[in-house]
Image (cartoon, rainbow, N blue to C red):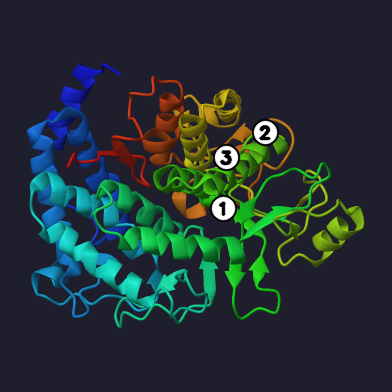
Amino acid sequence: MDMKKEFEEAVRVIVQIDWSSTSRRAIEILETTTRYLGGLLSAYDLSREASLLAKAQELGDMLYMAFDTPSRMPSVWLDLEKAKNGQLVAEKNQPAASATGLFLEFTRLSQVAQNAKYYDAVARIVNVLHDWQNLTKVVGMWPSYFDLQDTTFNHDNVFSLGVSSGVTYENIVKMYALLGGTDSRYEEMYRSASEAIVRTLLFRPMTPRKLDVVFPGTFRVANKEPLDPEIQHLACFAGGMFALVGKIFNVTEHVNLGARLTNGCMWTHKAFAHGVMPEAFTMVPCKLDGCKWDETRWRKSIEDNTYEGREDLPMGFVSARDPSYTLRPEAIESMFILYRITGHQEYRDNAWKIFQEIQKATETDDGNRVAADVTTKGKLQQREFSEASFSFSITGVVTNILQSYWLSGTLKYLYLMFSAPEVISLDDYVLSTGGHPFRIPKR
């Protein structure tokens, strides 16, 4: 963007950061890795500013301590005092993302710092994933929660592409690309996982116009009806993932499936009153080849829904457990990837419309903020909260919460959507779950 003066000013501040100075006793490994370490590595890859690499390695060495546990799996929380005394223990029941979300950043740090220890740390997790892939309760997939203490990945009954575990599948694909295809296990694991995802998670919703769109739900093994058709905004990354893999492995049907997934999220943005997609909502599931619209079945689903069914939602939607819009990038990310792969102008046109609707729904004098409920009609009102009293039960307002991924992800993908293809080419860069581009090394 040629903002070199601002960049240099930021670098001067960054190099003075003392990572050990924190108001918290324990640091969350996943968020610190994806946001801080990922941001530093990406900035280094784009600028070649040596001080940023030094700062990234300094932080990486601190985060590396999280792997100093009896199981060699990372502790989800890095307690600095326990780490100093060698007392860290990996937790038993933790979201899969807390371990698999570290892959790209630690791997890229090994590449640029020319030190294998960071990759060695996450490669241990990859080894366990590979060993357990065909031993879980849904063969080919990994559950939403892992036992990192005993390294058993088969005790959980829930399988999803949502907030707890979606990054596992995303990062397997991106690791294949970042490593230049040198480890065939990543392709092997993805192919097995994708077959299971299509078989168990994906469904076509029942809609009045019988749209050819697809969504991922949640599979609950212990339930009589295992497919839970709740859709998470975060899972919208799946469209880009399938399309990207289709391009990498030359599998046309995966590109087409990626388009159907992306079109579903794109359509949902337009379906709601404020033109933006809520965090979590439910629809009536059909098989992938679809089913006829049945208004009686739809209304019965509203009555029987586990969450509060709502007839005031657009036809086809049953409930919205979390009606907020939190400025997430995943839908825009997939639209960006599909545009780059297919060249279809519809993704660009819809991205511009969605951006305009986001502005209307979330823009304040102090930046874009989370909207508590985008399923209501009428103008969203602004209101300030203290963190202690904040609740999403207060509807129709724009809150005082600003998410960091608005800048690092959502706006970045929108900017790239309208940039020249050579700016962050998908042949030269892997974009992390935090929206940070990492340069793929040349062999």
Label 1's element? loop
Q: Which image quarter is the N terminus in?
A: top left
Alpha carbon separation for disc pair 3 and 2 = 10 Å
Residue 332 position in % (x across, y down): 51, 36
Residue pointed to by mark 1: 391
Quadrant for the C terminus in the image = top left
Pointer 1 with pointer 2, Cβ within 8 A: no
Q: Which of the two residues, 151 or 292, is positioned nearer the viewer here?
A: 292
Q: Are marks 3 and 2 in contact (CB under 8 Å)?
A: yes
SS class, disc 2: loop
Identity of the amino acid at label 3? Ala
Q: Which mark is residue 371?
A: 3
In the image, residue 67 above or below residue 57: below
Rendered image: mark on residue 274: 2
Image location (x, y in percent) of residue 134: 43, 76
Q: Nearer the viewer, mark 1 or mark 3?
A: 3
Q: Earlier in the sequence, mark 1 or mark 2?
A: 2
- Mark 2 Cα-neighbour bin, 10 Å: few <14, some 14–19, many ≥20: many
Judging from the image, what secondary structure is the residue with disc 3 in?
Answer: loop
Nearer the viewer's eye, disc 1 or disc 2? 2
> What is the CA distance from the residue labelled 1 to the residue labelled 3?
12 Å
Q: Going by the image, does 370 lie left or right of 91?
A: right
Dot placed on the residue nearer the N-terminal end, 3 or 2: 2
Q: Residues within 10 Å of mark 3 (few under 14, many from 20)?
A: many
**Which residue is painted at 89% across and 54% down in the image?**
294
Inspect this view and state whether residue 18 appears. no
Judge left or right: residue 249 versus residue 351. Answer: left
